């Protein structure tokens, strides 16, 4: 069964303290890996798409990387406004029997303290 | 651009009542999706529509029906609500089946 596991479940950092969030996946033929940010009471906000091992994407203080088994979301010198839940999701080939749509991990709840 | 809009924002139903959740997107996307989000479970796909005129079941379709009214609109109907359907419902859309999905603000549904 295809699975997406995110770790840690929760992470508390001091402002400026860099760290990484992990997303490991076991899927039969990855079509794409997606990172989202979700603030309380709101819908997920798209951050990055990664399609192949070795690919990297950056946006402000965030950088996402992808290997054959996992993805990392690196947060450099975070600020309090980076506090949110970060969700990882994978898309698998629909021709292989999977439905369209994304399979999500349970997320990492990130708190950045001033 | 409003992106993906959902109505209502909040709803309380009694067991057995029916209702329809509305979703519309103004990005000219082909594919649309309905998810539910429950504590400790993450987001799970209920139904999706790969293109106008088609709909298919996702991971948790029981108790729901959908209608792709036109390219812009995709509705989710609960025919006889049950307490197990208490959840936050999100609609999403994407340009293609492979592309990133954009989510609406959600509908918070409570079934008593």
Image: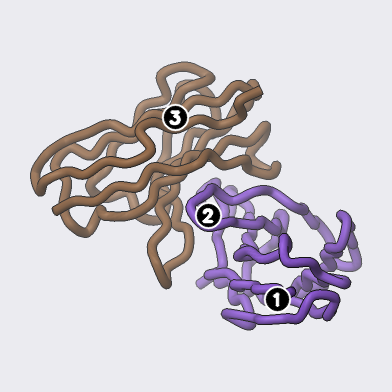
Using residue A66 as the reference point, say whether residue A9 is left or right of it.
left
Measuring 70% from the left and 61% from the top, which residue is drawn there? A30
**Chain ID, mark 2:** A
Residue extending furthest toward the top: B70
Residue extending furthest toward the front: A114
Do the residues marked 1 and 2 share a common chain?
Answer: yes
Q: Which residue is mark 3?
A: B23
Please say if the residues under marks 2 and 3 sit with CB atoms less than 8 Å apart. no
Instruction: Report the chain shown in purple.
Output: A
Query: Residue A40: image x %, image y %?
Result: 52, 57
Q: Quadrant of residue B77?
A: top left
Sequence order check: which comes first, mark 1 or mark 2? 2
Measuring 63% from the left and 74% from the top, which residue is drawn there? A26
Q: Which residue is mark 1?
A: A113
Q: Distance from label 2 to label 3 (Cα)?
A: 24 Å
- Of helix, strand and loop, which one carries label 1? strand
The one nearer the camera, B32 or A53, is: B32
Using residue B27 as the reference point, say whether residue A54 is left or right of it.
right
Label annotation for residue B30? none
Measuring 23% from the left and 47% from the top, which residue is drawn there? B63
Q: Mark 2 or mark 3: which is in front?
A: 3
Mark 2, other Cα within 10 Å: few <14 / some 14–19 / many ≥20: some
B63 vs A54: above or below: above
Q: Colour of chain B?
A: brown
Mark 3, other Cα within 10 Å: few <14 / some 14–19 / many ≥20: many
A76 vs B48: above or below: below
Indicate the colouring scheme.
by chain
Q: Distance from label 1 to label 3 (Cα)?
A: 36 Å
- Of helix, strand and loop, which one carries label 3? strand
């Amino acid at each position: 069964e295809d699975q997406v596991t995110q770790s840690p479940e929760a992470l508390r950092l001091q402002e400026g303290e860099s760290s990484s969030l992990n997303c490991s996946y076991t899927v039969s033929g990855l079509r794409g890996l997606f990172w989202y940010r979700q603030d309380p009471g709101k819908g997920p906000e798209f951050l990055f798409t990664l399609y192949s091992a070795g690919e990297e994407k950056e946006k402000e203080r965030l950088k996402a990387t992808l290997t054959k088994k996992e993805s990392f979301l690196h947060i450099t010198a975070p600020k309090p406004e980076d506090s949110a839940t970060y969700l990882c999701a994978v898309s698998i080939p629909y021709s292989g029997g999977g439905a369209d749509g994304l399979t999500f991990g349970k997320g990492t709840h990130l708190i950045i303290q001033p | 651009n409003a992106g993906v809009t959902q109505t209502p924002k909040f709803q309380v139903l009694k067991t057995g009542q029916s209702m329809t959740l509305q979703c519309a997107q103004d990005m000219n996307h082909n594919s649309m999706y309905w998810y539910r989000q429950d504590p400790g479970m993450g987001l799970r796909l209920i139904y999706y529509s790969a293109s106008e005129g088609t709909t298919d079941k996702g991971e948790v379709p029981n108790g729901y029906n959908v209608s792709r009214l036109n390219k812009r609109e995709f509705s989710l109907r609960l025919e006889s609500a049950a307490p197990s359907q208490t959840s936050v419902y999100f609609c999403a859309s994407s340009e293609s089946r492979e592309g990133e999905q954009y989510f609406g603000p959600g509908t918070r549904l409570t079934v008593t």
